[in-house]
Amino acid sequence: MKNIFILFSAAIVALFAFSCAPSEKTTVAGTEPPKAISSQFKMLSINTQHGLKDKTDVKRFSDWVKSTGAELVAVQQIIRATESKPDFDAYKELLKRLDMRGTFAKARYFQGWDSGNALFCMYPLLQSNAYILPTGKGRTRRSLSFGVFEMGLKPMAFASTDLDGDDLSERVKQVYEILAIQKSIEEYPIVVAGNFGESSNGKAPAKMLERYLCANSAADQTTGMEQHVYLPVNGKMKVLSSERVQYKSLNATGILVTVEVTQ
């Protein structure tokens, strides 16, 4: 009888210990991995085709840009004042109308103005640069506008460019130069946007895909566009949406992407 009582007591103790032990699914308070911090931004890329030639043009365009909700805008073929044409500067006027920070990279002269690529952003500009892309003799000069902006979670680098639309070999050389620029400033993976002169399935974009993800692939309507947005392959950025947008006043087609960034 005494042995039975001892066995019964041991069983009770074991059952109590088992019921109190944490199971595999039990989460002990304070041991959960911290949730990744993330944020989102909208980016627009569009070629204005030298169509912003007076303040009325810029006002109309800036109102349209604001309607897209874009926080960062990459613009190609925008003009700036020169000594021969000092009275109007589309880049400066657009900066004022959008109430953003910006940077410009001259590519060439156009009918007396400077023409090039620009970036506009509602967040603080930390640094900027203008890069000249390689062009063959007699070809239209090309550039890349580069800027680092404080996007909230962390600084991020962006670029706006306009590649050769007629010659594949020119485009490929220009893509190689963009990749070399990225390699030289590894601390800031660059989001590259602009007019690439062919669809995202083309041969020059294929070189970009060696180091980038193309946001155009997020939607059928943006796959065939010449306007592209490329995100660094670092697992920190994800395309939530990609949309074709039309600015009817200039018959210009742009791409609007929503990107999620993880800390």
Image: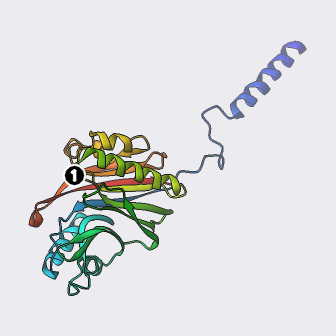
Residue found at x 75% / y 30%: 17
Name the amino acid type tagged 1.
Answer: Gly
Circle 1 SS class:
loop
Residue 238 visible from this viewpoint: no
Quadrant for the N terminus, please.
top right
| Residue 82 vs residue 212, the one in the foreground | 82
Q: State the scheme by which the image is colored.
A: rainbow
| Residue 129 vs residue 67, the one in the foreground | 129
* Residue designated by label 1: 165
Quarter residue 210 falls in: top left
Mark 1 closeness class: few <14, some 14–19, many ≥20 residues within 10 Å: some
Residue 19 sits above or below residue 229 on the image: above
Q: Position of residue 78 (x, y in %)?
A: 24, 70
| Residue 182 vs residue 6, the one in the foreground | 182
Residue 262 visible from this viewpoint: yes
The residue positioned farthest toward the bottom in the image shown: 87
In the image, is 43 to the left or to the right of 180? left
Residue found at x 27% / y 43%: 200
**Total labels drawn:** 1
The residue positioned farthest toward the front in the image shown: 137
Q: Position of residue 128 (x, y in %)?
A: 44, 70
Q: Position of residue 207 (x, y in %)?
A: 37, 41
Quarter residue 213 falls in: top left
| Residue 16 vs residue 89, the one in the foreground | 89
Q: Position of residue 16 (x, y in %)?
A: 74, 30
